């Protein structure tokens, strides 16, 4: 089991916690979802005494995580709380294009996500050579040792660790030697304790490349069905408890297209199928769309949710806002959700925590409260308020959430004060907001992992700080010499590629304010 001291520090020391293991309906059956689970627990809290009823170590671990979370959020109240997750599968995937995470980052993210009661992690970095380009080659011993450490860590945290392979770029499906290479590679990973595998066939040509494959299979979907069935059969031969997840070549759409329907209906029902929703990066995931996928494929979708990932065309965006637009009852019609992370491991932690909150209790999920709590966890309570001033500008993503809300609210108050001819009040409000911006800037300039990751965006934020300060100085002094500096800063801001809002033109953001004062 995980080192509780490492996860919770001394937070639980002052409480008298008793854990009772019971094998009964009360501890193993989720009444809401009508399923057996090893993740249910009951908390009975009376002052400093907490009684936990659960079925085993995993549910006891989640109960302790829950107590620590309630303590951290100042909501540990007397009463009885019966707890079980909404979604069966709750996790994340290192599945982006870009520099793979470091070993220490992987362990750090895993630890934090376990603390927030996620139960699944997929290892599939696109630019890991032995995952994709050199899929036939076995891992060097040093790499294998690091993978084993991740596997062992995941077991301590009661997380299912999926190792994924992506042979589709170069595999000749009709060549038995190719399949043998896949098997030998899999055996290497099985030897270090991996019993969860992923076979990824995404982002490859839709047409078969080799004439031998065309002659044998005719079309790509038939080759993929054969590969999946053969691979799954092999996995079950070496260990009946092994699980397999597949990412199809067509991984987004309505869910009733020819390829995905034929694939789903011709592979074993216990093979999980990744699906990103209507789009590659879906603004929303709905239960109606999930039902259509089930009808077409005879599988519940396991969502590969392409948020907060910001690779490819999104590289100028930083995605740290909360997850939204996922139906509250989606757990009824899907296996779960796996969030695809960013290259930036520290920044990924913030949206991942909001995923964890939604996946555990989707009906009562509050995006803003979850997001603010996530920032407190990742940034620290002492710096959370300062960081939020910056994070307020990073809502630009496929989710189409409202950006820069706190800034617009501050500007609206200043503008209204000017319109009411209360200049003193307007300047006080301006000084207040500028103070928050510079407190934020002071934090962002520290040499911390999260600050280094967001430097591309924080540099633009610094320009915004200077620009807004100069604007208010001009308003107060009417010093015409400041105009050239303001226009120079505006040009500098607009020339920087990092996205801080939906509209990269700062003139648009300040238009209303200018109209009010001129």
Image: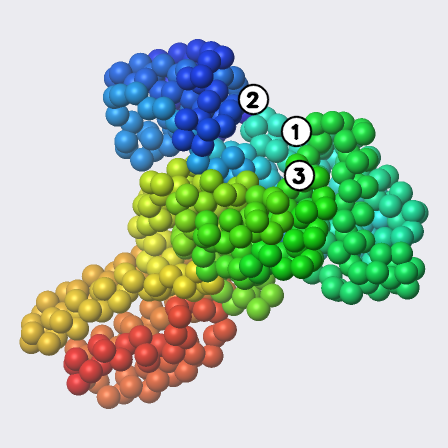
In the rendered image, which quarter is residue 434 located in?
bottom left
**Can you say whether 187 is above or below 506 in the image?**
above
Q: CA distance from mark 2 to mark 1?
A: 10 Å
Spatial CA distance of label 2 from label 3 is 32 Å
Residue 173 drawn at (x, y percent): 85, 53
Up the image or down, 198 lies above or below 168; here it is above
Dot label at residue 152: 1
- Mark 2 and mark 3 lie on one chain; the one further toward the N terminus is 2
Indicate which disc, 1 or 3, sits on the residue closer to the N terminus.
Answer: 1
Instruction: Pick the quarter of the image with the N terminus.
Output: top right
- Residue visible at 74% across and 51% down in the picture: 166
- Category of crowding for the residue at label 1, using alpha-carbon neighbours closer than 10 angstroms: few (below 14), some (14–19), many (at least 20): some
Q: Earlier in the sequence, mark 2 or mark 1?
A: 2
State how far apart marks 1 and 3 are (Cα): 29 Å
Q: Say how many tags the image has.
A: 3
Pair 2/3: label in front? 3
Q: Nearer the viewer, residue 357 or 424?
A: 357
- Residue name at image x 28 percent, y 76 percent: 510
Q: Nearer the viewer, residue 369 or 252?
A: 252
Is any part of residue 383 visible from this angle?
no
SS state under label 2: loop
Relative to 440, residue 71 above or below: above
Instruction: Kindly identify which numbered label has been placed on residue 1.
Output: 2
Q: Residue 237 location in percent, x, y? A: 81, 29
Residue extending furthest toward the front: 295
Q: Position of residue 155 (x, y in %)?
A: 62, 28
Residue at left offset 72%, top offset 44%: 267
Can you give x and y, in whole percent of width and height, for residue 390 in the image?
37, 59
Kindly identify which residue carries mark 3.
269
Regarding mark 3 in the picture, which secondary structure is present there?
Answer: loop
Q: Residues within 10 Å of mark 2 (few under 14, many from 20)?
A: few
């Amino acid at each position: 089991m995980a080192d509780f001291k490492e996860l919770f520090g001394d937070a639980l020391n002052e409480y008298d916690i008793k854990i009772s293991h019971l094998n009964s309906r009360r501890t193993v059956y989720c009444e809401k979802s009508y399923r057996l689970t090893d993740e249910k627990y009951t908390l009975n809290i009376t002052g400093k005494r907490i009684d936990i009823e659960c079925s085993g170590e995993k549910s006891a671990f989640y109960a302790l995580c829950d107590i620590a979370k309630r303590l951290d959020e100042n909501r540990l109240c007397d009463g009885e709380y019966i707890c079980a997750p909404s979604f069966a599968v709750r996790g994340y995937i290192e599945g982006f294009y870009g520099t793979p995470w470091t070993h220490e980052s992987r362990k750090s993210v895993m630890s934090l996500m376990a603390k927030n009661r996620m139960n699944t992690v997929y290892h599939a970095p696109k630019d890991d050579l032995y995952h994709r380009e050199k899929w036939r080659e076995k891992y060097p011993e040093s790499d294998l040792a690091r993978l084993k450490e991740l596997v062992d860590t995941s077991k301590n945290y009661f997380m299912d660790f999926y190792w994924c392979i992506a042979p589709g770029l170069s595999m000749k499906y009709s060549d038995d030697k190719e399949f043998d290479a896949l098997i030998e590679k899999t055996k290497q990973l099985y030897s270090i304790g991996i019993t969860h595998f992923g076979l990824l066939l995404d982002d490859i040509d839709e047409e078969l490349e080799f004439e031998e494959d065309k002659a044998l299979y005719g079309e790509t979907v038939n080759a993929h069905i054969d590969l999946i069935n053969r691979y799954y059969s092999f996995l079950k031969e070496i260990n009946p408890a092994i699980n397999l997840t597949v990412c199809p070549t067509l991984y987004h759409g309505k869910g009733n297209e020819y390829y995905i329907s034929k694939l789903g209906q011709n592979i074993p029902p216990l093979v999980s199928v990744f699906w990103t929703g209507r789009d590659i990066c879906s603004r929303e995931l709905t239960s109606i769309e999930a039902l259509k996928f089930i009808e077409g494929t005879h599988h519940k979708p396991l969502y590969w949710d392409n948020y907060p990932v910001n690779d490819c065309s999104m590289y100028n965006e930083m995605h740290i806002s909360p997850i939204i637009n996922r139906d509250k009852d989606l757990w009824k019609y899907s296996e779960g959700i796996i969030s695809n992370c960013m290259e930036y491991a520290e920044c990924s932690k913030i949206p991942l925590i909001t995923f964890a909150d939604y996946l555990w209790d989707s009906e009562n999920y509050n995006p803003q409260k979850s997001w603010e709590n996530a920032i407190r966890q990742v940034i620290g309570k002492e710096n959370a308020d300062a960081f939020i001033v910056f994070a307020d500008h990073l809502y630009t993503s496929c989710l189409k959430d409202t950006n820069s809300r706190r800034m617009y609210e501050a500007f609206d108050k200043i503008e209204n004060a000017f319109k009411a001819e209360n200049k003193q009040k307007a300047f006080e409000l301006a000084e207040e907001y500028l103070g928050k911006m510079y407190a934020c800037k002071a934090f962002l300039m520290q040499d911390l992992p999260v600050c280094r990751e967001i430097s591309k965006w924080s540099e633009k934020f610094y320009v915004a700080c200077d620009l807004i300060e100069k604007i208010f100085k001009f308003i107060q002094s009417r010093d015409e010499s400041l105009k050239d500096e303001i226009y120079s800063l505006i040009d500098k801001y607009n020339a920087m590629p990092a996205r801080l809002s939906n509209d990269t033109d700062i003139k648009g953001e300040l238009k209303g304010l200018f109209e009010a004062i001129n």
